[in-house]
Amino acid sequence: MFLKILAFILPWRLRRLALQSWFGYTIHPTARIGLSWIYPHKLSMAEGARIGHLNIAIHLDGIEMGVKSSIARSNWITGFPSNSNSKHFSHQAGRQSLLILGECAAITKNHHFDCTNVIRVGRFTTVAGYQSQFLTHSIDVIESRQHSEPITIGEYAFVGTNVVMLGGADLPSRCVLGAKSLLNKAYTDEWTLYGGVPAKPLQVLPANAKYFNRADGFVY
């Protein structure tokens, strides 16, 4: 804990070196972490990756951030490490507690990521708005035990504000999940607007929409 506190208060250049030396993290010289408490077991930040202020990331196997991916501010990212001696999830061999962001993937503000199982956010995807929940674990009432399933969000997808995605959910590439929706299953059709509680296909989206074809991750 002392080393974590010491690293937290260091200027960024020294902090990056400390995080790599003391914790074995891999952080590209152009990557940066703001005033945030980021201590997964493993951390990999590629060129230009950014974590803003007031984020907390703890109790995770790892965070992997692709080139120019970003986590803005005030996000809570937690999980349940696979190396725990607890009986929780002991029936799930091979489970990993990971957050994986592809190239130019972006998470905005005030979201909650429960990475008890893997949450994967594809290239050029935006988790937009505020107060969305991504919950990979719950109680299996049939077996009376904790159980987890991964959440997958494809490439060039757009996740609207204040949504809920549950374990086993899959939002395909080049799709939109509408505001305040609940996605609780795996879909496969791309170029689709999904929405509602629970979410279902609502509309086919045009393949020439500029968001789905952009070369720059940031949307002006």
Image (spheres, rainbow, N blue to C red):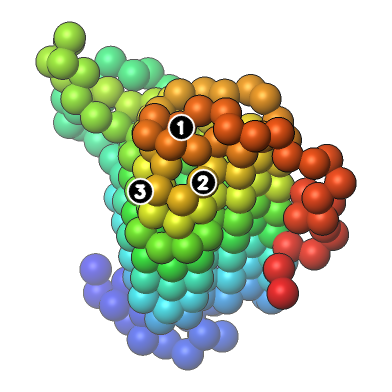
- The residue where tag 3 is placed is 133
Residue 199 coordinates in the image, percent (x, y): 46, 32
Is residue 177 visible to the viewer in this orientation of the structure?
yes
Q: Nearer the viewer, residue 34 or 21?
A: 34
Q: Are marks 2 and 1 in contact (CB under 8 Å)?
A: yes
Q: Secondary structure at mark 1?
A: loop
Residue at the far front: name it: 203
At x 47%, y 63%, the residue is: 129
- At x 46% / y 51%, what residue is drawn? 179
Contact between labelled residues 3 and 1, with CB atoms less than 8 Å apart = no
Cα separation, mark 1 vs mark 3, equals 15 Å
* Residue 75 visible in the picture: no
**Whole-percent x, y for residue 170 in the image:** 53, 30
Closer to the chain start, of discs 1 and 3, is 3
Q: Earlier in the sequence, mark 3 or mark 2?
A: 3
Residue at image position (24%, 68%) is: 1
Q: Which mark is residue 199?
A: 1
Number of numbered markers: 3
| Rendered view: 59 above or below 175 | below
Residue at 27% in and 23% down: 147
Q: Which residue is mark 2?
A: 178
Mark 2 or mark 1: name the one nearer the start of the chain.
2
* Quarter occupied by residue 218: bottom right
Tell whether 99 sits left or right of 146.
right
Q: Nearer the viewer, residue 71 or 163?
A: 163
Which amino acid type is shown beneath numbered disc 1? Ala
